[in-house]
Image: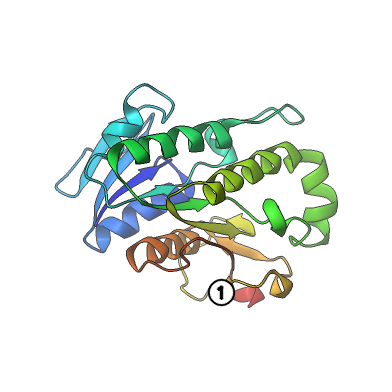
Amino acid sequence: MRLAIIGATRGIGKALSEQARAAGHHVVAVGRSLGPAASANLTHVRGSILDDGVAEEALERADAVAYCLGAGSYGPDVGKPVDIFSRTTRRLLDAMRATGVMRIGVITGVGSGDSRGRGGLLYDKVAMPLALGAIYADKTRQEEMLRAGDRDWTIIRPVVLTHGPYTGTYRVIEDLAELRGGTVSRADCADCLLKALTEHRWSRRAVAIVGGDAA
């Protein structure tokens, strides 16, 4: 598979790039400051997805695209309006239509859309209203764009992310009534996203992911 990764510089996107390449896939990594030099199974596209031509270059001949931009990718000011997720998603969907790419997997988070109020007491009552509200309002707009569009999407909503190792013991939750907060490593989240795209799981569905400690 030729997989374009938006936000490949750090976090889930970086882990996904490493895992996909180890599995024999070709990665097109998009980011402003990318690490190791390009190789036989790694192509770099430097810049922001909002820059002219970057999205189209990244998606050329791609089988699928993974959206891994997180709040740390742009450093939002707490309390200020956020629109980076909806703007980049709109740009990406336009480029997908132009290049004919149908499949997209997107990382949002528990707290967006109908998962709001499912992150656990501290997360829902403290972190969300004080620091994350504007971010997740835009992630909700992002999810609405995907649902309203004509692409084949999967939304993956991690709970609180950690820098822990890959475990493979995480749980994918399709019924929000079963979600009770928890944590999950970025590496496990990347593995879940890779399975969604390479094995065509959870088509046009939003799922949550939680680590084995909360399973």
Residue 134 position within the rendered picture, expressed as x and y whole percent measured from the top left: 72, 36
Q: Is residue 30 left or right of residue 71?
A: left
Residue shown at the point (59%, 59%) measured from the top left: 158
Q: 15 and 109: which one is in front?
A: 109
When asked about the image quadrant of residue 43, the answer is: top left
Q: Is residue 109 above or below residue 213?
A: above
Placement of the C terminus among the 4 image quadrants: bottom right
What residue is pinned by disc 1?
171
Name the residue nearer the viewer: 106 or 159: 106
Name the spot of residue 54 as percent of width and height, x first. Answer: 33, 28
Q: Dot 1, crowdedness within 10 Å: few (<14), some or many (≥20)?
A: some
Image quadrant holding the N terminus, namely bottom left
User: Residue at 57% of width from left, 36% of height from top?
Assistant: 86
**Left or right of residue 12: residue 54:** left
Kind of residue sitting beneath label 1:
Arg
Residue 181: image x %, image y %? 72, 65
Q: Image check: 111 left or right of 203? A: right
Q: Is residue 136 above or below residue 33?
A: below
